Image (cartoon, helix red, strand yellow):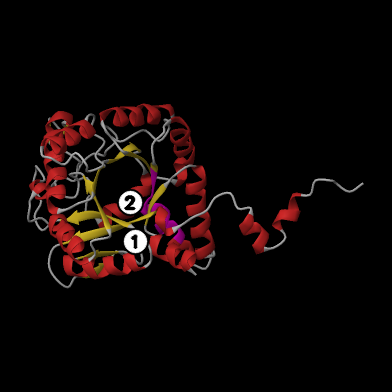
Amino acid sequence: MFPLKRLRRLRKNETIRRMVRETRLSPDNFIYPLFVTYGKGIRKEIPSMPGCYQESVDKIVKHSKEIYSLGIPSVILFGIPEHKDEKGSSAYDEHGVVQKAIKAIKNAVPELYVITDVCMCEYTSHGHCGIIKNGDVDNDLTLEILAKEALSHVNAGADMVAPSDMMDGRVKAIRSLLDSEGFGAIPIMAYSAKYASSFYGPFREAAESTPQFGDRRSYQMDPANRIEALREVELDIEEGADIIMVKPALSYLDVISDVKQTFNLPVAAYNVSGEYSIIKAAAKLGWIDEKRMMMEVLTSIKRAGADIILTYFAKDAAKILND
């Protein structure tokens, strides 16, 4: 006897599949990461991240116009300064590379929503995400510097700040300073559940932020922990976060789902450099269909519960979605 319920009826062709599709991607879901460096006329490809570049401000402006033309609403900026020191003073320099890039982008493409990564690792000579004391990152000494960095970005014209350092209390410190300086309307997207992941390797080459000693496991989360992520998210919400982020994305889809089901806030997920580079490398070897895998990966992140996806695939995916 033939089955009465045939689920294949709704898979017969692309038209019906589109009509009943549960999860839909849009360029509106994407934030594109950019790496800003000093100098002029610089567009240096990152070897481990094909298609991604370290770019000087003039090149970033041109690139930003392209990004916006594809319907991608937002970028997030990471800085590579000319000078690094123990305290990461370039991070809050009003004439720093990120601060200059913010002003230039907002002048050239005012509608593009500019988010800035707030952290110390790109700016410190030791490559850690805060002030070193007795051989480790001192949490409370770092908070003041992070808040100053966030304020410098907002003074330059940033639309949103995104602290990624994983110091306890940093959302409150940033929120308090921004509010006291008249920037109560500026939202914070907190890297709330950021894991000490091996998937960050290519990014550290791109941002020139590899730790010069030790690792970041004393402040980034243990990859084995799931419940702890909810505690981290809850604390950031209490301190004033407007958007909460899980990073990385693919190995933490369960965490994305948990966070989305537990909290009534927009959820972002970072499809990180290692996840990008793996696909690029496999495609170069002819082992996979890059476009199909890219779209499957991004769909899985959205399906897990992410409202926003930070991804180096944003431009390529937007071109497909715009067709």
User: Picture coordinates of residue 227 (x, y %)?
Assistant: 43, 27
* Residue 319 falls in image quadrant: bottom left
State left or right for residue 282 relative to residue 49: right
Mark linked to residue 6: none
User: Picture coordinates of residue 211 (x, y %)?
Assistant: 22, 45
Residue depicted at 36% across the width and 54% down the height: 273
Residue depicted at 13% across the width and 59% down the height: 100
Mark linked to residue 48: 1
Residue named by callout 2? 201
State left or right for residue 254 relative to residue 80: right
Around disc 2, counting alpha carbons within 10 Å, would you say few (fewer than 14), some (14 to 19), or many (20 or more)? some
Q: Dots 2 and 1: beta carbons under 8 Å? A: yes
Q: Amino acid at mark 1?
A: Ser
The answer to whether residue 6 is visible is yes
Q: Which residues are magenta?
A: 268-279
| 132 and 227: which is toward the camera | 227
User: Picture coordinates of residue 35 (x, y %)?
Assistant: 24, 59
- Give the vertical position of 275 relative to 232 (above or below): below
State left or right for residue 189 relative to residue 154: right
Q: Amino acid at mark 2?
A: Gly
Q: CA distance from mark 2 to mark 1?
A: 9 Å
User: Picture coordinates of residue 318 (x, y %)?
Assistant: 43, 63
- Where disc 2 sits, the SS reads helix
